[in-house]
Amino acid sequence: MSASSTAESEHQRLDALARFAIESTADPTLDGLASLAALICGAPIALITVVEASHQWTKARFGMDLGPVERESTFCTHAIDSEYVLIVPDTRFDARFATNPFVTRRPSIRFYAGAPLISPEGWRFGALCVMDHRPRTLDVRKVESLRLLSRHAMVHLQMRRQLAIGIAGTEPGELRVPMAAAAVSHGLRTPLTSIRGSLALLASGYAGELPPAAREMLAIAERNSVRLGSFIEDMLAERTGRDRTKV
Amino acid sequence: MKALIVDDEEDVRYVARVSLGNVGGMMVIEACDGKEGIARARAERPDVILLDVMMPGMDGPETLKVLRGYAETAHIPVVFLTAKGMAAQVSELETLGADGIILKPFDPLTLAARVRAILES
């Protein structure tokens, strides 16, 4: 795979992850699945992680309270590149991890096994992983258990997502906002924020008293920036076939 | 009250700074991307964070998750400041756990009052 296609694929993965909107709040069910993974694998640590563009964050945990970590320092960023369960029997003898601060310093992780969290569309959002402070491995049954638990975790996240959509009163199909309209919305509203904001501040006297002719010209500019805003709202409403959102 | 504005658009930051600071009487600090926003939030503990949604690199939702992950920033109220104004986009944002959403373009004369209202609600 070329570098550009890899970047494109990562962009699509992050888009899919953003659409999935995994909440950062604690989830006892997922904490339970992490505990179960640790028990089955006989490991002191188990985590369910989400790998975003720059950071990894922990959705569920057992045995270690891990905050956000820069992505390049994480094990799970490698797990999401794996087709199956990534197993590292001894991190000190694996070039990807030997100099990792989680290996060379506390908590001195020596063993890692991570099963990717795979979305229904096939995107890998993060991993369910177990870790140990000593080198070791997992037998086939435990590897399969880890994979099944990661599937359970993903199904649970999917159900939570559907529930959240239900509460928000939005049908799944409505989330697929046409990309061109979304880009137009952002591309037009952002400069309009600066234009209308600056005009309103000028009119408020923030920059000092304006001469009558300047006030007249400012009023013209303000009126027309409001017209432009209304036009943008109407155009977007028409493109998406929806009522306009109040600003 | 100390507010942190995180937005990659310099002009928007300027308008928001004047709106919250000069008009609204808040102390305002700024960051131009998610990474800097996290660093400033951790170092300076603002009372509220106004967070742009669409930023290059680390976007608003990711920044929010990281902020919620650090003990010192987990409880700071976060208000999304977004140009994603379509109803479905707003519905998506409402599920992400921010304390409020303010759409762009916003009224600079009432921005501080809206932020305070969100904090009090």
Image (spheres, coloured by chain):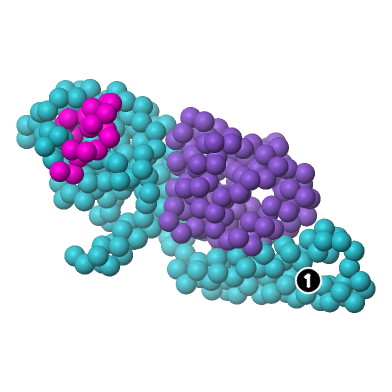
Colour for chain A in the figure? cyan
Residue A244 image offset from top left, x and y in percent: 62, 65
The residue segment tinted magenta is A95-115
Side (left or right) of A192 relative to A24: right
> Mark 1 falls on what kind of element?
helix
Quarter holding the N terminus of chain A is bottom left
Residue farthest along the right direction in this orientation: A212
In the visual, does A92 lie left or right of B66? left
In the rendering, at what x and y percent does residue B111 appear? 72, 51
Residue B109: x %, y % from top left: 78, 55
Q: Does residue A42 appear left or right of residue A120 in this picture?
A: left
Q: Is residue A110 magenta?
A: yes
Q: Which residue is mark 1?
A: A222
Indicate whether A97 appears above or below A61: below
Furthest residue in direction left, as rendered: A140
At 32% across and 39% down in the image, what residue appears? Answer: A49
Image label count: 1
The residue located at (77%, 66%) in the rendering is A199
- The percent position of residue A38, horizontal first and vertical second, equals 22, 26
Q: Is residue A22 shown above or below B43?
A: below
Q: Is residue B116 visible?
A: yes
Q: Tell me which chain the residue with mark 1 is part of.
A: A
Quadrant of the image occupied by residue A216: bottom right
If the image is split into quadrants, where does the C terminus of chain A sit? Answer: bottom right
Query: For chain B, what colour was chosen?
Result: purple
Amino acid at the residue labelled 1? Glu
Query: In percent of the image, x 39 and y 38: which residue is there?
Result: A68
In-image side of B20 versus A160 (left or right):
right
What crowding class fits label 1: few (fewer than 14 Cα within 10 Å), some (14-19), or many (20 or more)?
A: some
